[in-house]
Image (spheres, helix red, strand yellow):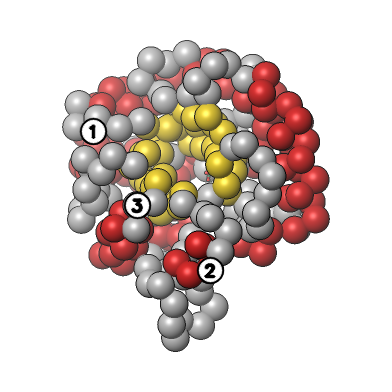
């Protein structure tokens, strides 16, 4: 299983350091083969002395240049960052990232050999149309994305389950993951209101290869409860 923590726009540099040091002390108790990835905010990126993966929540698809407010490859290389989150619904919806831009980003970081956690997920109105509409929608989010890329990890995150406290049901997760597995031979994470109280059930689904956790990852004890459940 892969356990990924997405801090979003939370935590300072100082609180991130304290968090990572505590995680470093305890994450070894996890099951053999389990992996941990943390996505702190960009101001908290540093060369931490930890033996799990630190990734970035976002970056611009270029080495450096005139892209005000953005972070490029050169800045990531300074901290040995080789893992990136792409396609998160908050960037698609709030920051208006188009599928065309997302696939450009994907292809740039693929060429740089990054591990890419690529997020897909349907909004509530699509879910209400039924499962085949959901699948069509998810498949459209693979436009321009190389599903055979060896460092690709997919994260299925229904938008209506993100930050709402209401996770998708075990049946809903199972059905979508099974259908995605018919097309993709890569790990598939589930995200959307994963928390200590539902991790055991979600982790027991055979087609779930890990979880991407937002709110319940913000306190290190809560993320450790998930990781060590
Ligand atoms: P959540 O967020 O755990 O707060 O629902 C998950 C995510 O957006 O990755």
Q: Position of residue 56 (x, y in %)?
A: 53, 55
Residue 184 is marked as 1
Please tell me how crowded label 3 is: few (under 14), some (14-19), or many (20+) other residues with Cα within 10 Å. some
Earlier in the chain: of badge 2 and badge 3, it is 2
Residue in view at x 80 percent, y 55 percent? 14
| Ligand 1 contact, mark 3 (Cβ < 8 Å) | no
Q: Is residue 216 above or below residue 225?
A: below
Where is residue 47, by image quadrant?
bottom right
| Residue 55 position in % (x across, y down) | 53, 50
Disc 2 designates what residue?
75
Cβ of mark 1 under 8 A from ligand 1: no
Q: Is residue 54 left or right of residue 117?
A: right
Q: CA distance from mark 2 to mark 1?
A: 31 Å
Mark 2 and mark 1 lie on one chain; the one further toward the N terminus is 2
Q: Quadrant of the C terminus?
A: top right
The dot on residue 117 is none
Query: How far apart are the two marked residues, 2 and 3, measured between alpha carbons?
Result: 16 Å
- The residue that appears at 57% across and 21% down in the rendered structure is 199
Circle 1 SS class: loop
Q: CA distance from mark 1 to mark 3?
A: 19 Å
Quick one: label 1 or label 3, which is nearer the N terminus? 3
Query: What x and y, as percent, mark residue 112?
Result: 34, 58
Residue depicted at x 24% and y 51%: 145
Front position among marks 1 and 3: 3
Q: Which residue is mark 3?
A: 113
Q: Is 224 or 173 nearer to us in this picture?
A: 224
- Residue 57 position within the rendered picture, expressed as x and y whole percent measured from the top left: 52, 55
**Residue at image location 25% in from the left, 43% down from the top:** 149
Q: Quadrant of ligand 1?
A: top right
**Mark 2 crowdedness (10 Å alpha carbons): few <14, some 14-19, many ≥20:** some
Query: Callout 1: 10 Å neighbours few (<14), some, many (20+)?
Result: some
Question: Is 111 positioned to the left or the right of 94 in the image?
Answer: left
């Amino acid at each position: 299983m892969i356990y990924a923590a997405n801090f979003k726009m939370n935590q300072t540099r100082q609180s991130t350091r304290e968090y990572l040091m505590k995680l470093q002390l305890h994450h070894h108790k996890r099951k053999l083969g389990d992996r941990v990835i943390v996505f702190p905010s960009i101001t908290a990126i540093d060369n931490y002395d930890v033996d799990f993966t630190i990734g970035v929540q976002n970056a611009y698809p270029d080495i450096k240049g005139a892209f005000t407010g953005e972070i490029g490859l050169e800045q990531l290389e300074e901290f040995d960052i080789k893992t990136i989150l792409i396609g998160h619904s908050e960037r698609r919806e709030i920051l208006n990232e188009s599928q065309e831009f997302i696939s450009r980003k994907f292809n740039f970081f693929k060429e740089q050999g990054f591990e890419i956690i690529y997020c897909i997920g349907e909004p509530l109105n699509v879910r209400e149309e039924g499962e085949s509409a959901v699948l069509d929608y998810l498949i459209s989010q693979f436009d321009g994305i190389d599903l055979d890329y060896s460092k690709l990890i997919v994260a299925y995150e229904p938008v209506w389950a993100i930050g709402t406290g209401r996770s998708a049901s075990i049946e809903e997760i199972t059905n979508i993951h099974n259908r995605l597995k018919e097309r993709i031979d890569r790990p598939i994470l589930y995200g959307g209101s994963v928390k200590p109280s539902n991790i055991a059930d979600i982790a027991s689904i055979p087609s779930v290869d890990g979880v991407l956790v937002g709110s319940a990852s913000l306190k290190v004890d809560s993320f450790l409860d998930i990781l060590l459940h």
